[in-house]
Amino acid sequence: MDGRGWIVGIGVGMASLLAGCVEGLFFHPDQRVYATPQQLGIAVQDVFFDSGGVRLHGWWMPASGAVRATLVQAHGNAANVSNHAPLVSWLPAHGVQVLCFDYRGFGRSEGSPSLDGVVADTRAALDEARRRAGPGARLVLLGQSLGGASAIRVAAEVDDLRLLVIDSAFASYRGIARDAAAASPLALLAPLAGASLPDASRDPEAAIARVRAPLLLLHGERDEVIPIRHSERLHAAARAPRQFVRIPDGRHLDALTRETVRQRILASIAALP
């Protein structure tokens, strides 16, 4: 084999290796306790529910006073529920009961994560929230980052969702993989490795066109992880009614730390029929 063929052979081998593990690079779970309910000053019930034979764990936060809505949080790709719950722990005081849950392989949930698996887990969490809330509940699905991609895919399948809130999500699995690899020495191999990811038919951008619930999109203009152009594509593909909140100085997943954004979410919930 000449030098060029040897290099090509190594490249193909590395691409195959990358393709085998690239999906795993989307997930960074752990079991560390970042915050306890006591530290957050909230009442929490541990809940366990099934997702296709996988036992998942979550935190159920009952609302204070009359229940205005029931919200499911599909969190980002790292850590576990104790790290993401602070972003929604303010909602129960406003009459919104919340289910935060961990995908398979995260926190106290069983199994190992996969891109289709976390979609199934989000669907199972919405089913659990629906069961707990009872008939006629105002169901709200909040997806953040990777959880936003999963939430969009689930929202496209259901007809009783009252509001979809998407924070800092990406429009395409292969597109965000290319973005992440752009500054890497492996950038030339990224297209080959990305072939193992869901194709365009399963992208959030394709699914969002089928979502019937009102949509509230949130994205920081200075997001260093997922460029805001991904939300611009999602907004362009979505049906009305839709709102797009651009946060001029916002970075990745800091939207719900801002009082103005929280009030925007509460106003969207208050406007629900």
Image (tube, grey):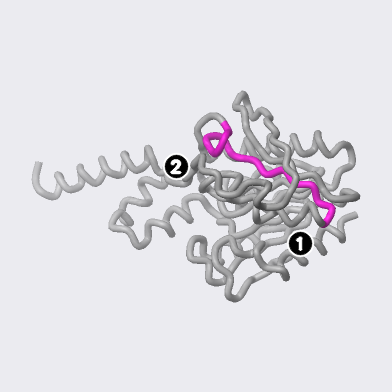
- Pair 1/2: label in front: 1
**Front-lying residue, 118 or 47:** 47
The answer for how far apart the CA atoms under marks 1 and 2 are is 32 Å
Residue tagged 2: 23
Whether the residues at callouts 1 and 2 have beta carbons within 8 Å, the answer is: no
Q: What residue is shown at x 90% (from left), y 50% (from top)?
A: 66
Looking at the picture, how far across and down is residue 190, in whole percent? 36, 51
Quadrant in the rendering for residue 33: top right
Residue 273 seen in render: yes
Image quarter of residue 16: top left
Residue 86 percent across, percent down from the top left: 65, 54
Return the disc, 1 or 2, that comes first in the chain's sequence. Answer: 2
Which stretch appears magenta?
94-109
Label drawn at residue 225: none
Q: Residue at x 55, y 67 (%)?
A: 251
| Residue at the (73%, 53%) spot, across then down | 164
Outermost residue to the front:
38
- Label 1 crowd (10 A; few <14 / some 14-19 / many >=20): some
Image quadrant containing the N terminus = top left
Amino acid, disc 2: Glu
Q: Is residue 104 magenta?
A: yes
User: Visible in this render: residue 149?
Assistant: no
Q: Nearer the viewer, residue 32 or 193?
A: 32
Check disc 1 and give the amino acid type: Ile
Q: Which residue is mark 1?
A: 265
The location of residue 230, given as percent across then percent down, is 56, 61
Q: Residue furthest top?
A: 53
Up the image or down, 189 lies above or below 243; here it is above
The residue nearer to you, when weighing 163 against 78, is 78
In the rendered view, does 255 fall on the left or right side of 11?
Answer: right
